[in-house]
Image: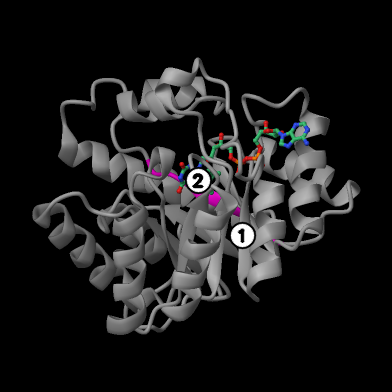
Amino acid sequence: PQEPAFAALPGDIGVSFEFFPPKSEKMEAQLWNAIEELAPFNPRFVSVTYGAGGSTRERTHATVSRLVTETPLTPAAHLTCVGASKGEIDEIADAYWDAGVRHIVALRGDPPPDSGGRFTPHPEGYASAADLVEGLRKRHEFEISVAAYPEVHPEADSAQADLDNLKRKIDAGASQAITQFFYSTDAYFRFLDKALAAGIEVPILPGIMPVTTFAAIRRMSANTAIPEWMESLFDGLDERPGPRALVAATVAADFCRRLYDGGVRDFHFYTLNRADQAFAVCQLLGLRATGDSQ
Ligand code: FAD
């Protein structure tokens, strides 16, 4: 007999959640509500993004510090090279270290909107994420995660050049990578094979982005292919939040189950500060918010 699609898994799964720093009191309440709801899944870490151009320096720090002082969670602070000198980055890194933060997600950052899409390093700053990793490692004993792109970063000269760059980031001292979101399990597994062949042996966590609205997903996916079957599945749902959320959670859970079947045990969720989708997917993966697994 065929196994039910969502038969219990053995509970050997680890999860992590990404949040962004809130801009208003209302968004702050929403964020902390999401953190409270997801905390019982015992995430391995929770990460907090750094706004484009370093625009959330204080807010990212405030959110991460509050995670340290008010929750048992392990926070990871995102940090980018954009618009900051090496000295300023050192100050930010020191402040995190002093606040008890031990995990940094080190990124180059996107070029500002007025730059014509080209990244220009600060004259006294870091030129790439690999340089930033090296600088951070010299300063403190941080655990460092970096970004990876199963469907290739849009500015890379080639897939191989992008992989070489990932290798440089690992060689500079990063101990894990987190991927851009993707909707093709094949693309991810092919990427893992190529990374291994290139000598990259650290974990490469899949970044899971359940569909919010289809329009939003299309806007955010620079190099992420959106399969035709998904377009068709979400057809007519952009104005129907209730059914859309149910369909999105089912699709994301099925996606994670397929990754699981291919050997993946750690999943990183882009939550956009909302708990429901990630919660439902964790539940469908057999995790329980009681801290137990099914
Ligand atoms: P890098 O690894 O430096 O790579 C950038 C590009 O340059 C790539 O195309 C790479 O192949 C190329 N490159 C680098 N060095 C060389 C070299 N020596 N020779 C040739 N080519 C080279 N952005 C934010 O602003 N804030 C965030 O909090 C944030 N969080 C993110 C989290 C994750 C998990 C991911 C996947 C992305 C995140 N981003 C964030 C987006 C990220 O900043 C952008 O994708 C940015 O354009 C690239 O950053 P990177 O760290 O991958 O850069």
Instruction: Report the disc number at residue 145.
Output: 1
Which quadrant holds residue 21? bottom left
Q: What element carries label 2?
A: loop
Task: Work out whether 135 lies above or below 286.
Answer: above
What residue sits right under mark 2 in the picture? 84
Please count the marks in the image: 2
Indicate whether residue 259 is drawn in magenta: no
Q: If the image is split into quadrants, where does the N terminus sit? A: bottom right
Secondary structure character of the magenta stretch overall: strand
**Contact (Cβ within 8 Å) of mark 1 with mark 2:** no
Q: In this view, does 283 lie above or below 78?
A: below
Magenta stretch contains residue 205: yes
**Horizontally, is 1 left or right of 278 in the view?**
right
Q: Quadrant of the C terminus?
A: bottom left
Inter-mark Cα distance, 1 to 2: 20 Å
Q: Is mark 1 within 8 Å of ligand 1?
A: yes
Q: Mark 2: which amino acid?
A: Ala
The image position of residue 80, as x and y in percent, is: 52, 48
Instruction: Give the numbered dot on residue 75.
Output: none
Which quadrant contains ligand 1?
Answer: top right
* Apparent side of residue 42 relative to residue 177 in the rendered image (left or right): left
- Amino acid type indicated by mark 1: Ser
> Which residue is located at x 31 percent, y 58 percent?
58
Residue 235 sits above or below residue 260 on the image: above
- Residue at x-position 71% and y-position 27%: 156
Quadrant in which residue 215 is drawn: top left
User: Measuring 23% from the left and 27% from the top, which residue is drawn there?
Assistant: 237
Counting other residues with Cα less than 10 Å from the Cα at mark 2, is it few (<14), some (14-19), or many (20 or more)?
some
Task: Name, please, the residue furthest toward the left.
Answer: 26
Give the magenta part as a residue range: 203-210
